[in-house]
Image (cartoon, rainbow, N blue to C red):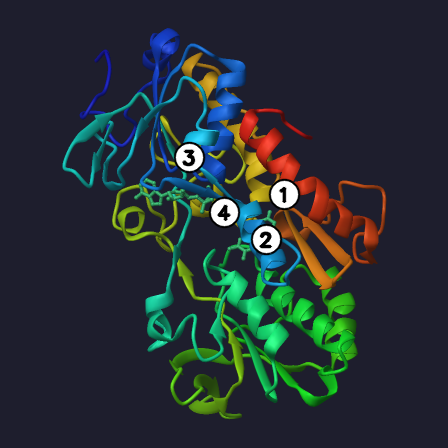
């Protein structure tokens, strides 16, 4: 039997490579999401093959530089430094559909939009990020932004974090972390260290009981960084509480409820008063991915960890937080993934073998003091991958300069414009 194109008989593979090859000159590439991963992949593709017909489906008018929100929450960045209008950064020659994808039909090479319209593709890049589960904690959505409840995980709330830090007059500050995976796994701690640093500098820290309440039982997933972080936990006198999962917030009573376990593993509920509560919400794969044929068992996009191509559908690729891969979900990971995705799309269209080019690199600049950072950089299986020839487990002023001054330029001017930095 000869397969001439999109083929329902030979599912789950839709295209054979030779069918895609015939389409290279005018292949239609559709991208789900115009965030860090979507736009960086498009930039890397256009740099290599300007003639491709690219359409990006993105509902938002704004694009956010989320790594900057930690510094907004510490009063270092103004919020405006972390947002640009989509119009201002939209890749030249890429079509735009202002809508959201609701359904994948990979057997028909179609995505369905909120409007009901279907969009067909030859190649699909899936990059819608992840869903922040504010709704998974009772009372949280109502509490955010008032009575001391905040989160650097929202653009509009990061300035409130800084307001609370400056005005903190109470005794109890709690910083929470949910179960993994989350984007930028260090971000809940970063908010805490920078708050402690401010309180220490104004002589208030000794009067504040600071708790880090984490649903998991390790401080950081990559082991070599745990010990230097523990030194900061001790330095600031932080009360480290593992297996404490935030399940409810009552902003009016300023009361947080945690689920934990007794010594014999029985579930126990603990209520804690707070004056300031910084919440990192639980995070999950978006429902439209989770409930699609593209998802793995956990609901994430089922891609090969090195080529980033879908394990079942040869003409679908993933980039960014949506990928069901074991790397740290960071923009730094996207910076390394986007060129791999771009090259592998072109190789697919040429009928050639793919590059297994992504090594799991991700990075988390741990802002342990205002002015010093432990620049955690690691790949799959926790392999340390420092960019610079230094001991990356040490807190450094130069890493702070990198985060504050250079990385925003790398993001806006390089990553989103196809100027790839190794
Ligand atoms: C507080 C905080 C601190 C962080 N710190 C760092 C850091 O220091 N270093 C670092 O490298 N990373 C950091 N990150 C993580 C980094 O921002 C993310 O990993 C990165 O943005 C992921 O890119 P993405 O394209 O997968 O998702 P996003 O950038 O979130 O983009 C997803 C896009 O998809 C769109 N979309 C959603 N649903 C749909 C749909 N149904 N249809 C079409 N489009 C859709 C969205 O509107 C959005 O534009 C941090 C994140 C946060 C929140």
Distance between the alpha carbons at the discs numbered 2 and 4: 33 Å
Question: Which residue is labeled 1 in the image?
Answer: 361
113 left or right of 378? Answer: left
Distance between the alpha carbons at the discs numbered 2 and 3: 19 Å
Query: Can you give x and y, in whole percent of width and height, for residue 79 in the image?
Result: 54, 52
Q: Are marks 2 and 3 in contact (CB under 8 Å)?
A: no
Query: Which label sits on residue 325?
Result: 4
Distance between the alpha carbons at the discs numbered 1 and 2: 29 Å
- Crowd rating for badge 4 (residues with CA inside 10 Å; few <14, some 14–19, many 20+): many
Question: Which residue is labeled 2 in the image?
Answer: 78
Viewer-nearest of discs 1 and 2: 2
Query: Can you give x and y, in whole percent of width and height, for residue 361 in the image?
Result: 63, 43
Closest to the observer, 16 or 148: 148
Viewer-nearest of discs 4 and 1: 1
Q: Is residue 273 above or below residue 369?
A: below
- Crowd rating for badge 3 (residues with CA inside 10 Å; few <14, some 14–19, many 20+): some
Q: Are marks 3 and 4 in contact (CB under 8 Å)?
A: no
Viewer-nearest of discs 2 and 3: 2
51 left or right of 354? Answer: left
At mark 3, the secondary structure is helix
Label 3 or label 1, whichever comes before in sequence order: 3
Residue 284 in view: yes
- Crowd rating for badge 2 (residues with CA inside 10 Å; few <14, some 14–19, many 20+): some
Distance between the alpha carbons at the discs numbered 3 and 1: 27 Å
Question: Which residue is labeled 3 in the image?
Answer: 86
Distance between the alpha carbons at the discs numbered 4 and 1: 11 Å
Viewer-nearest of discs 3 and 1: 3
Closest to the observer, 92 or 281: 92
Q: Are marks 1 and 2 in contact (CB under 8 Å)?
A: no
């Amino acid at each position: 039997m000869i397969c001439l194109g999109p083929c329902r008989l030979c599912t789950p593979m839709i295209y054979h490579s030779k069918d895609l090859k015939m389409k290279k000159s005018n292949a239609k590439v559709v991208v789900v999401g115009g965030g860090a991963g979507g736009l960086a992949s498009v930039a890397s593709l256009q740099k290599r093959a300007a003639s491709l017909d690219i359409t990006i489906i993105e509902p938002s008018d704004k694009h956010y530089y989320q790594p900057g929100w930690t510094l907004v929450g510490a009063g270092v960045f103004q919020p405006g430094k972390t947002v640009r209008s989509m119009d201002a950064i939209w890749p030249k020659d890429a079509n735009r559909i202002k809508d959201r994808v609701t359904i994948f039909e990979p057997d028909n090479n179609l995505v369905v939009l909120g409007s009901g319209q279907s969009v067909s593709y030859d190649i699909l890049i899936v990059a819608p990020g992840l869903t922040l589960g504010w709704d998974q904690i009772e009372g949280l959505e109502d509490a955010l932004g008032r009575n001391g409840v905040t989160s650097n995980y929202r653009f509009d709330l990061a300035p409130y974090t800084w307001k609370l830090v400056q005005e903190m007059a109470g005794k109890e500050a709690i910083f929470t972390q949910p179960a993994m995976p989350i984007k930028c796994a260090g971000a809940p701690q970063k908010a805490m260290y920078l708050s402690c640093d401010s309180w220490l500098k104004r002589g208030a820290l000794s009067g504040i009981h600071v708790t880090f309440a984490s649903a998991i039982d390790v401080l950081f997933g990559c082991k070599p960084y745990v010990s230097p972080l523990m030194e900061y936990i001790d330095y600031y006198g932080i009360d480290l509480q593992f297996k404490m999962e935030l399940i409810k917030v009552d902003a009016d009573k300023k009361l947080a409820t945690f689920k934990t376990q007794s010594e014999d593993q029985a579930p126990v509920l603990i209520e804690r008063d707070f004056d300031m509560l910084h919440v990192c919400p639980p995070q999950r794969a978006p429902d439209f991915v989770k409930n699609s044929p593209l998802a793995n068992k956990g609901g994430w996009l089922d891609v090969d960890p090195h080529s980033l191509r879908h394990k079942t559908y040869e003409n679908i690729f993933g980039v960014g937080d949506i990928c069901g891969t074991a790397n740290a979900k960071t923009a730094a990971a996207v910076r390394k993934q986007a060129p791999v995705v771009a090259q592998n799309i072109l190789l697919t269209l040429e009928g050639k073998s793919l590059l297994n080019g992504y090594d799991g690199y991700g990075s988390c600049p741990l802002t342990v003091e205002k002015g010093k950072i432990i620049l955690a950089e690691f790949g799959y299986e926790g392999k340390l991958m420092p960019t610079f020839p230094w001991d990356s487990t040490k807190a450094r002023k130069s890493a702070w300069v990198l985060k504050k001054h250079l990385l925003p330029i790398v993001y806006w001017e390089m990553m989103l414009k196809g100027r790839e930095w190794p």
